[in-house]
Amino acid sequence: MLKYTLILPDADEQLAAKLLRAAIDDLNVVLMLVFGQGEKAEQVIAWADQLCAKFENVEGQSFRRVVWNRHPEMPAVRNILDPILSGAMPFVAVLNFFNRLKAILNFDEEIDPIALEIAFMKGHQV
Amino acid sequence: MKRISLRIGVALVLALISTASAQVINVMQHIRYEIVKSKTGEASPAKNKSSTRLVGWSIATMELEFPGRLEIKWDRDGLLQELAQGVASTDPRLIERINKLGEIVSKVLEIQTWFIRVKTVAIQLETARAAKNTVQVNALDATFIAVNDTFGKTGEAALKALQQSMQADPELNLALRNPVNEALLQGVDYTPVAHAVADYLQQQHEALAEQIGVSVEQLVFMRAYLMSQQGRIRLHLDGYDNIPEGQPLPESQIFDQRAQLELKSATKLGEAVKDVVSDQFVPEVKKAFEQLQASLRELSQILQTEVLDAQLESLINDLQLAADQALGPLIRSLKETHKLLISLRNLPKVDDAPSLEQIVAVLNSVSGRVNLIGKALQQLPDSLQSYIVQAEKLLREKPEVIQEETVNKFKEAAQAFLKNENIASMKKIYANLRDIVKALQAAEGIAGAVVDEKPHRIQESLDTALNVLATDLVEMHVGDVIQIEVEVVSTPANAAGGTVDRHLERQNFRLQKYGLYREARGGLIFVDPRAKIKREIEFTPVPALSINWLLGIKNFYLWNRLLAPSFGVSFALLDFDDAKEIENGLAVNASLFRNFAWVGYGRNLQVKADYFYLGFNLHGLANLLRL
């Protein structure tokens, strides 16, 4: 079960954009964005969600979070992402507390929990 | 965690060493000293640890507070790595991997440190937010960002190092991939990651030890010495020798051997102290040896333990046949006692007119048994009584495991043994043996020759401990030096070739007490009467004894080692009046420079005349020079 991951809705583009905007606007979190579908994406999401658990507080909230956007091609979503990602579309992106892009991982890279943890670590940095 | 942090220190030290020179070996760098304050010198029960202080890595002469126990802990893995550099057959990739892994463990533990800070500040921030304390929130916000930044940088560096090492080393990748991933995903913090790497590092160390052992056998000898006025005396190091330790001296003892020796020296001013000691030594050893001969003869006549041995064996056999797990501890205890009894019987034979070499050989064999006999004296009566009770209880409660006849015969034999004079005789023998050991301790040359050294293979645990307290065999005083000596002897495993390499290093500790402490000293004072007396004397030399109180202050080396002022009282036998047979002088004494220079003012109690004196202590000068 994913505990710290927001899965953006596939069917409602406007709602997806609204939720993504809200997640990005929360400056109290290190945010990992995962784009796309398939087995690899599911595996990465499962690992990333687990890597958030160390930072859970007493209320069950973590200041590491994951957003899974299975359809990054949605125009409303792209409008939000493009300024942050400079138009690129990586497989994984990590934003720091100030919404600065700190790490990206591309789909053809070998991704394992160590690689994801390193990406998160970059997200903790100013 | 502790285990890991120890390794880290070593890894750092190793890194420094390896950059300095691969040829220079420095084994002392791999030792960590821990001082446990203990008046008894007993090993490690927590209740005896009044305080624990880490002294740190080996550096120049350190102060060692006593009485206590000096625990000597080796980083064997670090030592192995260093020694491996000189062994041609070791795989350089293995050493490189070990070095890298050591650094990685260190870095991962650093992540943990920052992780805890991040979590702490996060909690503080949440609390401040809940309380709507804006000022505090702003301040903590900045801190939160700062600690996260450091945490992120530390973590990135550590994990990248791990990732790169794994990518470059398929074997490492295969071994660590799953454990590290699991530790990252499942762990509530970063210590499981450190453990995963450290466990593999440990395996690599074992592999290295194997490789070294194939071509070179490396033995580690450890020795401890006390360097004092009595000379350089070898002390017992757990597991490394058979030197007897002696019984702790009662604190109430004021005038110890040093004070008596100093008084003697003062009396015989001009005679070299060494001559005094050596003149006493030979007759003392001879006397002790004669006593030993007599004692051993006596022992063989009276120590009729055969009956008890046999019954003890029957009892053990019966209990073993019962195959009852609950009886395990009792059987083990009975076997121990049995072993003890047998070893007491195997004392060496002594010729009537032994040569010095024979004396040394016999003493070598006997001195190792002194502790054993002492142990037997303490344990045997209680143990036997307890076995009788336990055997009778077993007979009542579990008659199927033991025969009544066995119990009765054992009881009879044990009671007979306890009733006869064996115990008292053993005590006498024990006292004789202790005399011998004492004589040996006084003679450095022979004491060194009789020590049965027990070197450790490099693959074994090398840790040991030293009781640092005055005993009836060895006195210790503030200012004395404890020297730890390590010798690593490397011998080619293939006897056909190669040379034996010996490497020797030493570390000194200066004994110190903190707070107010007392010392009794002997000295020569020059007495000047301050009243009209019948004799015409001024500044006449008289031997005196003083009891002084000093103040030891932590980290005040100049005060402790050089100035060391003290105040107390002194006693002297005076001669102001030829008509008086006894004249006792009692004075208030002050001294400086570790009891070297004395000054005092007192009164001749019989003649009723005051006096002033200046004085000195010859050994105090020696102490000063030694600092």
Image (cartoon, rainbow, N blue to C red):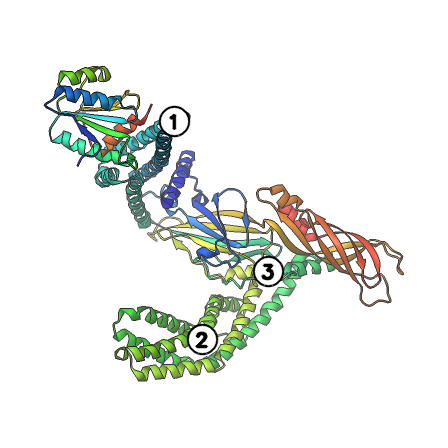
Label 1 to label 3: alpha-carbon separation: 59 Å
> Label 3: chain?
B
Mark 3 secondary-structure assignment:
loop
Q: Same chain for labels 1 and 3? Say yes or no.
A: yes
Residue kind at label 3, given as amino acid type: Glu
Label whose residue precedes the other's in the sequence (1 or 2): 1
Residue, disc 3: B251
Residue B381's tag is: 2
When the figure is inspected, residue A74 is found, relative to residue B372, above or below; the finding is: above
Residue, disc 1: B137
Assess whether mark 2 and mark 3 are in contact (beta carbons under 8 angstroms).
no
When the figure is inspected, residue B595 is found, relative to residue B585, above or below; the finding is: above
Q: Quadrant of the N terminus of chain A?
A: top left
Q: Of discs 1 and 2, which sits in the foreground?
A: 1
Assess whether mark 2 and mark 1 are in contact (beta carbons under 8 angstroms).
no
> For the residue carrying disc 1, how many other residues have a C-alpha within 10 Å: few (<14), some (14-19), or many (20+)?
many
Measuring from the top left, give residue B528's x and y in whole percent.
83, 53
> For the residue carrying disc 3, how many other residues have a C-alpha within 10 Å: few (<14), some (14-19), or many (20+)?
few
Label whose residue precedes the other's in the sequence (1 or 3): 1
Q: Quadrant of the C terminus of chain A?
A: top left
Name the residue: 29% across, 77% down: B397
Residue kind at label 1, given as amino acid type: Val
Which of B414/B575 is in front?
B414
Figure quadrant of residue B527 = bottom right
> Label 1: chain?
B
Question: Is residue B577 rendered to the left or right of residue B450?
Answer: right
Figure quadrant of residue A16 = top left
